[in-house]
Image: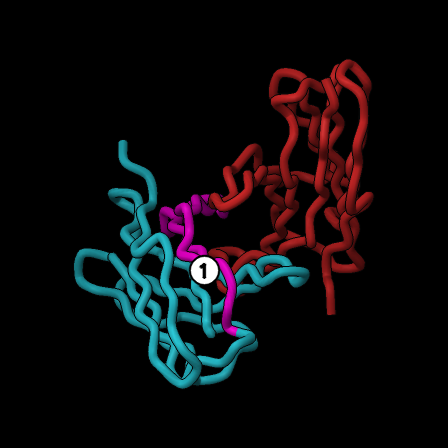
Chain colours: A cyan, B red
Amino acid sequence: EAGVTQSPTHLIKTRGQQATLRCSPISGHTSVYWYQQALGLGLQFLLWYDEGEERNRGNFPPRFSGRQFPNYSSELNVNALELEDSALYLCASRLSPGPHEQYFGPGTRLTVT
Amino acid sequence: TQLLEQSPQFLSIQEGENLTVYCNSSSVFSSLQWYRQEPGEGPVLLVTVVTGGEVKKLKRLTFQFGDARKDSSLHITAAQPGDTGLYLCAGAKSGGGADGLTFGKGTHLIIQP
């Protein structure tokens, strides 16, 4: 069974540009979570999508947004990129409703110059 | 506010030694997960503990959830170089994962051969 996949692996953007990151959950999982892992800050919860709807978001500005498609894949958009947005962005999927376990993809390394 | 405090932050020991990593909080969690993360990769789920006082074993790794569901520990017996990595604890505060997972900053573990 394929795990969570993310693309691209690496992304380099300049300040002010927009970035789009993509995630495909484990087959059968309907919930997708996005996390930011910045150096020294640990993993921070960004967004939760379930059944195509945004269910909750963490303490991040509105320029972090996303959506979930009918096939449960998801994309994260970051507008007006700032240098401090440089981080590893991780997507996780969960069988919902069900146990709390979240399974992570390999991440997208976003570098803003 | 860091809701989950992990200690120690860094640990370097010799192969064959035992070690314990702690994850503490003033908050109650409905479940707690432990992950291991390799550089440049996503976290890999090791275990989920749900019941206060629960103990789970995974080969040489023993995980315990505190009676009050506010803390957890990971004990490794006879550590091996393959155990090297970043160990993360993550708590789910609500059922259904509505708040996303709250992560500790992790314990960087190095096992010297």
* Rendered location of residue B8, percent (x, y): 82, 43
* Rendered location of residue A54, percent (x, y): 36, 72
* Rendered location of residue B55, percent (x, y): 70, 28
Q: Which residue is at a point 47% across and 56% down the rendered structure image?
A: B96
Q: Is residue B80 left or right of residue A82?
A: right
Residue B27 in magenta stretch: no
Say if A57 sits above or below B51 in the image: below
Front residue of B35 and B97: B35
Front residue of A106 and B20: A106
The amino acid type found where label 1 is placed reads: Tyr
The residue stretch that appears in magenta: A85-109
Q: Which residue is at a point 45% across and 66% down the rendered structure image?
A: A111
Say if A105 sits above or below B38 in the image: below
Residue B87's image quarter?
top right
Q: Is residue A61 left or right of residue B19?
A: left
Residue B82's image quarter?
top right
Instruction: Find disc 1 in the rendering and name its residue.
Output: A89
Q: Secondary structure at mark 1?
A: strand
